[in-house]
Image (cartoon, grey):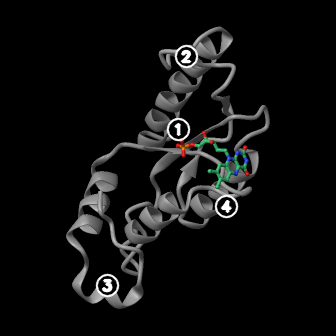
Amino acid sequence: MDLPLFNQDLEADFPAKAVAIKQVVEQADGVLFVTPEYNRGFSGVLKNAIDWASRPWGKSSFAGKPAAIVGASMGPLGTTQAQSQLRNVLLYLDMKVMGQPEVYFNAITSLDEQGHVVGESREFIKSFAEAFVAHVRSAASPR
Ligand SMILES: Cc1cc2nc3c(=O)[nH]c(=O)nc-3n(C[C@H](O)[C@H](O)[C@H](O)COP(=O)(O)O)c2cc1C
């Protein structure tokens, strides 16, 4: 979406694309972060978007929002490190991050040729989605 690379000098004239991201996050009941793993880290494109929406200082769009993380790669343990790093960032941003279930999605064994989720992964993704909905609801009205 043509989001500029984050540069604090640009905050004085906050880019419209960054304002748009902040609005999307602020209007959402919860945020689902989806990432591949690149060189044992999460996506730099995602980090750039997070950095914009966390600014300006004191006006982060993330504080207190429920969140969950999903990752897909080609290996069985793919995205473990990407997700772990992303979790640290989200916790620093004071998001309410869902701990379980975790999804390390294998894009080779879990998708058919049309890109549809198949096998046990289908039920697992469904249970993850249900858990995330419950997490968002409980964050909205904590017991
Ligand atoms: C530069 C690069 C680095 C990668 N590093 C990892 C990695 O550290 N661990 C992993 O499981 N997969 C790694 N992969 C595989 C990607 O996670 C996989 O191709 C993923 O499905 C790409 O998602 P995308 O199509 O949304 O970019 C890497 C791929 C690229 C292009």
Q: Which secondary structure, mark 2? A: loop
Q: CA distance from mark 3 to mark 2?
A: 41 Å
Q: Earlier in the sequence, mark 1 or mark 3?
A: 3
Q: Earlier in the sequence, mark 1 or mark 4?
A: 4
Q: Which mark is residue 88?
A: 4
Is 141 above or below relative to 58? above
Nearest the camera: 107 or 63? 107
Q: Which mark is residue 117?
A: 2
Residues at discs 1 and 3 in contact (Cβ within 8 Å): no
Residue identified by numbered label 1: 143
Eye-nearest disc, 3 or 2: 2
Residue identified by numbered label 3: 11
Q: Earlier in the sequence, mark 2 or mark 4?
A: 4
Nearest the camera: 139 or 123? 123
Q: Quadrant of residue 77?
A: top right
Q: Quadrant of residue 112?
A: top right
Is 135 above or below relative to 27? above
Q: Quadrant of residue 7?
A: bottom left
Hey, what amino acid is under mark 4?
A: Asn
Q: Is the distance from the Cβ of mark 3 to the nearest ligand 1 atom less than 8 Å? A: no
Q: Position of residue 75 (x, y in %)?
A: 75, 34
Residues at discs 3 and 2 in contact (Cβ within 8 Å): no
Left or right relative to 119: residue 40? right
Residue ID at (69%, 34%)? 74
Hey, what amino acid is under mark 1?
A: Arg
Eye-nearest disc, 1 or 2: 2
**Total count of labels:** 4
Hey, what amino acid is under mark 3?
A: Glu
Q: CA distance from mark 1 to mark 4?
A: 25 Å
The residue lying furthest to the right in this view is 77
Residues at discs 2 and 4 in contact (Cβ within 8 Å): no
Q: Earlier in the sequence, mark 3 or mark 2?
A: 3
